[in-house]
Amino acid sequence: MLDLDNTLIDRDEMFRRAARQFLARHNLPAIDLDWIVRLDDSGYTPRDDVAASLLARYGRSAPRPAAGVDALVTGGGSEYAAIAPATARALRDLRTAGHRTVVVTNGTVAQQTDKMIGAGLDVLVDGWVISEAVGAKKPDPAIFHAAAELADTGFAGAWIVGDRDDSDILGAHRLGLNSVWLRRGQVWKRKDFCPTRQADSVSEAVETILSVR
């Protein structure tokens, strides 16, 4: 089971590109880019809060600001979704080794599906489970149970790969599953649980999984 945002795809870079385009399109200060990125917080700030803050800042200075804000907030840069060649190879390696691969992601069905299809993941994985569709968000065990049911494999030999300690790795911990945490330049700080392994990329995570099988 693999996370989507900032694991299989670089969600932060996608949003940054979309935010840069938003500023340019509405003749707004380019220097505000970092403020918008911080406001977004990798997608973890509630979308309504992001929209409200953007409208409060730009509502009087940009033509048709609501339309631009809505496109940025609901789209999240999905038009820039792409998967790195090394990540695509790693997913193919998992399949070749007999693993079933399911993406487990928090978000809306429309946005997350657009990202996965846009990145070409629909031909690289066996399926996906989106929180809005199943009514449960990571780290709730229910979303991982839905993924296991989709894969038709149960949890035997399952791994969870992701970049978030509070959703991906915590979810694995609650279920007693092996996990690989993608560091993304960070250091693991939690004391109450820890990942089985750590990696700097999906390809490294897959190498780890295949080496212990």
Image (tube, rainbow, N blue to C red):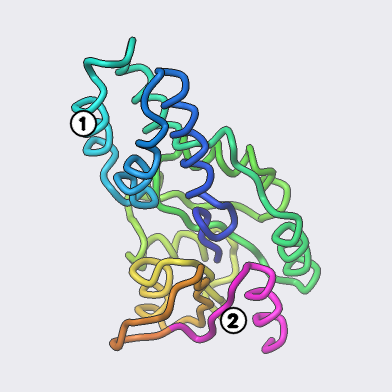
Extreme top residue here?
A: 63
Task: Depth check: give the residue in front, 175 or 29.
Answer: 29
Q: Real-space Cα distance between discs 1 and 2?
A: 44 Å
Position above or below: 200 against 83? below
Position above or below: 188 against 79? below
Q: Which residue is mark 1?
A: 52
Disc number for residue 157: 2
Left or right: 93, with 118 as reference point: right
Position above or below: 26 against 200? above
Task: Report the residue at 40% width, 44% height from top.
Answer: 133
Left or right: 25, with 211 as reference point: left
Task: Depth check: give the residue in front, 125 or 182.
Answer: 182
Task: Report the residue at 74% width, 61% height from top.
Answer: 86
Check the picture and name the quadrant holding the N terminus. bottom right
Name the amino acid, label 2.
Gly
User: Is 206 a magenta residue?
Assistant: yes
Task: Depth check: give the residue in front, 148 or 56.
Answer: 56
Residue 10 x %, y %: 55, 52
Crowd band around label 1 with a 10 angstrom C-alpha radius: few (<14), some (14–19), many (20+):
some
Q: How many marks?
A: 2
User: Mark 1 touching mark 2, by CB under 8 A?
Assistant: no
Check the picture and name the quadrant holding the C terminus. bottom right
Q: Secondary structure at mark 1?
A: helix
Q: Secondary structure at mark 2?
A: loop
Give the mark toward the camera: 1 or 2. Answer: 1
* Start-end of magenta stretch: 195-213
